[in-house]
Every structure is written in structure tokens, then in C-alpha cells.
Image: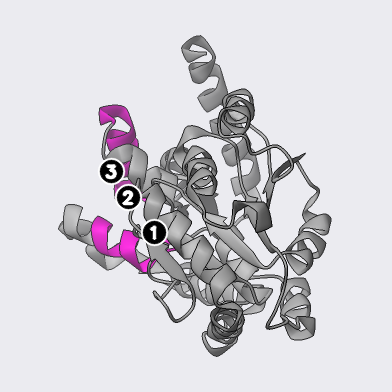
């Protein structure tokens, strides 16, 4: 894989160089792309915007190579955008010399999810709680914590969990379903086209996210826009949109007993489930977290740096 990297970077450079001919601004997503775009921008004398995601910042904390890539992207970019206030603050703290370049433009949600939220009617009494997880089945997402929590639940016979996504952890998660005797409770839906996600959220009662690290997860924003209560790990990027006991419930990473307790709480108190979902939906609306606003913020940024 490492042998393919030089060719990949050269190809990326050639693509940036070609597309830069008629451009006024170069916009790169992820640090590695920002590094290459930054080099092209210097050579072409063009301003560069680099948008960083949570994984860029997380990987830089443990990898010297990723830290160098991130620092180089920051140095070469005219403007650096993060999707999370928490990560903007962290970057400003770690790279104070480039703090003036760093800003936050949060992601939004598609209007289709707002339509789901507008039509949601959560009954005050129900026989089962339908949970949904949406994301890659990889260790960082902590799906094993969700399965362990279900095994601790007092109401496990009333829980249905839909795991939407695929990845290298699928086999080990299948094994955990057997180990914890969760057959009949857990459904693996695999990869689902983006157009099908609103319907899946419409059928769910709550989203559960047990990631060990995140940026500002779109899946959580989309669940909130769909009027769902969210139970999630108390980590940067997530805890700035999930306000504990207001727009969702936050548990400590690794505390599967606490997660199980919150799942049971939503079954015991359907009025809380309803209130958290309504508050989450209102949070998305009150903060204008829709793609139109995100797009306008980027257009304003393009216009500003192109005119500098």
C-alpha cells in the first residue's frame, strides 16, 4: 500500500494542477488534499481553502506523519475550515501562529430529514424501542460497546437495533451478537443508498453512537433533524451538538453499563424520548443547520479570499 502512495500523490497533484488553470480559489477536503492543493496554490499563486474533518485532527494526535501533513496543510492554506468548534479550538491551541486562518463552518442536513422531523409523532406508550446506528463498522465507531450494552439491558426483549453500514468489523460484531445472545434483536442492514436513509430514520425511535472519536458526525445531525433522540459518547465534536438531557443523552466512552441504563430510561420514560427528539429537532432549526446555510458560508469565504 505504501508503494502506491507516491503515485497517488503525483496523480492528485496533476489533477489539482489541471483544474487550477481556470480557478480563482482551490478548495480541498482533508489534510492530505490540503497539502497537495497548497503546493499547487503556491505555484499557481491561487488562494487555497482546506476543510478538515475530525479524523484529520484525531490521527495527528498519535501519528508523526499525520501531524506533519496537518501542519503542512495549515501552513500552505489561505483559510482552514473545520466542521466543529471543538476542533477549531484544538487547532488554535496547538498552532497559535496560524490561528487567524482557522474558522468553523458546521455541516448541515438535507431538507428531506427536516420533512421526517416535521411528520414525526412519537407515541407516549410503545412495546419496543427501535434503535439505529449509521456508520462504518470499524473499531473507532465502538459498535461493540452498543452490543455489550444491549446484553446488560433490563428490557432487552423490547429493543430492536438496526446497524446500517458495513466494514471490516462486521465478522467480529456478528460473533458478539452470538456471544451475547442478541439474535432477533440486532439487524445488519449493510450499506444503504443515501436516498434511503431518511426512511430508515423515520422508522426509528432513537439513534445510538458509541464512537471513541468523531468530528461533527453528519449521522447525528441527520437524526436530530429527523426528530430522533440521540444517545452518544461524551466526546469532542459530539458534545457540542448533543446537550445532555436536553437534545440527547451522553455517556462516558467505555461505560457500557451507563449506556444500557440510558437505553432502559428511554423505554421506562417514553415522555423523555419524545421530549429529547423534539428538542433535537428544534436545535437543528434554531441553529440553521441546513445545507443551504453551509453553502452560503462557503460562498462568502470564497468571495472574501478571492478578493484579498
Q: CA distance from mark 2 to mark 3?
A: 5 Å
Separation of marks 1 and 2 at Cα, in angstroms:
7 Å
Give the mark nearest the N terminus, 1 or 2. 2
Lateral position of residue 75 relative to residue 264, left or right? left
- State the image coordinates of residue 52 (x, y, percent, origin top left): 43, 52
Indicate whether 119 appears above or below 143: below
Q: Is residue 270 visible?
A: yes
In this view, 233 is above or below 304: above
Tell me which residue sits at (81%, 49%) in the image: 193
Task: Tell which circle, 3 or 1, labels the residue nearer the N-terminal end.
Answer: 3
Residue that label 3 marks: 71
Tell me which residue sits at (48%, 34%) in the image. Answer: 139
| Rendered image coloring scheme | one colour
For residue 105: magenta?
Answer: no
Q: Is residue 85 magenta?
A: yes
Which residue in the protein does label 2 denote? 74
Mark 3 and mark 1: span between their CA atoms? Answer: 11 Å
Q: Residue at x 44, y 81 (%)?
A: 246
The magenta stretch is 63-91
Residue on which disc 1 sits: 80
Residue 110 appears in which quarter of the rendering? Answer: bottom right
Assign the C terminus to one quadrant of the image.
Answer: bottom left
Circle 1/circle 2 CB separation < 8 Å:
yes
Residue 95 visible:
no
Residue lying farthest to the top in this orientation: 3
Mark 3 packing: few (<14 Cα in 10 Å), some, or many (20+)? some
- The main secondary structure of the magenta stretch is helix
- Front residue of 154 and 110: 154
Element marked by disc 2: helix
Classify residue 91 as left or right of residue 191: left
Q: Are marks 3 and 1 in contact (CB under 8 Å)?
A: no
Amino acid at each position: 500500500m505504501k508503494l502506491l502512495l507516491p503515485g497517488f500523490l503525483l496523480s492528485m497533484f496533476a489533477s489539482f494542477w489541471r483544474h487550477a488553470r481556470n480557478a480563482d480559489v482551490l478548495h480541498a477536503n482533508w489534510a492530505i488534499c490540503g497539502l497537495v492543493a497548497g503546493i499547487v496554490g503556491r505555484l499557481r499563486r491561487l488562494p487555497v481553502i482546506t476543510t478538515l474533518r475530525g479524523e484529520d485532527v484525531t490521527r495527528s494526535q498519535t501519528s508523526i506523519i499525520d501531524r506533519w501533513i496537518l501542519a503542512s496543510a495549515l501552513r500552505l492554506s489561505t483559510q482552514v475550515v473545520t466542521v466543529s468548534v471543538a476542533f477549531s479550538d484544538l487547532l488554535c491551541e496547538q498552532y497559535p501562529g496560524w490561528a487567524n486562518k482557522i474558522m468553523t463552518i458546521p455541516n448541515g442536513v438535507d431538507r428531506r430529514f427536516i420533512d421526517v422531523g416535521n411528520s414525526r409523532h412519537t407515541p407516549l406508550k410503545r412495546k419496543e424501542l427501535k434503535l439505529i446506528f449509521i456508520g462504518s463498522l470499524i473499531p473507532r465507531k465502538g459498535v461493540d460497546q452498543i452490543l455489550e450494552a444491549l446484553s446488560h439491558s433490563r428490557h432487552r426483549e423490547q429493543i430492536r437495533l438496526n446497524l446500517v453500514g458495513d466494514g471490516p468489523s462486521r465478522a467480529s460484531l456478528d460473533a458478539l451478537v452470538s456471544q451475547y445472545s442478541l439474535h432477533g434483536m440486532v439487524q445488519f442492514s449493510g450499506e444503504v443508498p443515501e436516498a434511503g436513509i431518511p426512511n430508515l430514520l423515520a422508522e426509528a425511535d432513537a439513534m445510538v453512537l458509541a464512537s471513541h472519536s468523531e468530528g461533527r458526525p453528519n449521522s447525528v445531525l441527520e437524526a436530530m433533524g429527523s426528530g430522533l433522540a440521540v444517545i452518544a459518547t461524551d466526546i469532542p465534536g459530539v458534545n457540542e451538538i448533543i446537550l445532555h438531557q436536553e437534545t440527547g443523552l451522553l455517556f462516558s466512552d467505555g461505560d457500557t453499563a451507563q449506556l444500557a441504563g440510558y437505553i432502559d430510561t428511554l423505554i421506562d420514560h417514553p415522555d423523555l424520548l419524545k421530549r429529547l427528539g423534539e428538542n433535537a429537532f428544534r436545535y437543528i432549526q434554531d441553529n440553521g443547520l441546513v445545507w443551504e446555510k453551509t453553502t452560503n458560508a462557503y460562498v462568502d469565504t470564497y468571495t472574501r479570499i478571492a478578493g484579498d
